[in-house]
Amino acid sequence: MPDSYKEFEASSLFCPRCRKAVAVRKKLLLVLPTGTKYDYLCAECGAPVGGKMDQDPAEFHRTAPVRPFNSPGEGGRNRRG
Ligand SMILES: [Zn+2]
């Protein structure tokens, strides 16, 4: 068997639900100042099959600043239209 490993690319991972190697979808999970966290989901059944943490803060600076959660009962009530 030719052992030609390229850089590990998570294009297919083993899915415990499908019980086979499946194509995965990369899903942005968290954007932190220290890096970006991705989740890999099975493209067939949607089960999480893995994750990845990029030590690259670039995405953080690209995205809009995180706003605090709207506290319920405040704002939006006396707004019309
Ligand atoms: Zn699956």
Image (tube, rainbow, N blue to C red):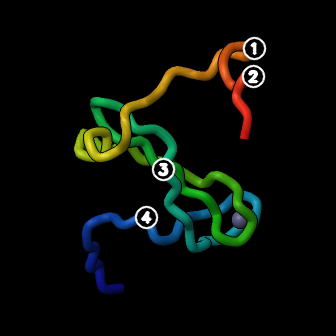
Cα distance between the residues tagged 3 and 1: 30 Å
The dot on residue 7 is none
Cα distance between the residues tagged 4 and 2: 46 Å
Q: Quadrant of ligand 1?
A: bottom right
Residue 13 picture location, percent across and down:
54, 65
In the image, farthest residue toward the bottom: 1
- Residue assigned mark 3: 28
Quadrant containing the C terminus is: top right
- Residue assigned mark 1: 73
Q: Is mark 3 within 8 Å of ligand 1?
A: no
- Three-letter amino acid code of the residue under disc 4: Ala
Quadrant containing the N terminus is: bottom left
Cα distance between the residues tagged 1 and 2: 8 Å
Residue 73 picture location, percent across and down:
75, 14
- Give the mark nearer the N terminus: 4 vs 3: 4
Q: Is residue 76 above or below residue 18?
A: above
- Residue assigned mark 2: 77
Name the residue: 51% across, 43% down. Answer: 29
Cα distance between the residues tagged 3 and 2: 32 Å
- Give the mark nearer the N terminus: 4 vs 2: 4
The dot on residue 10 is 4
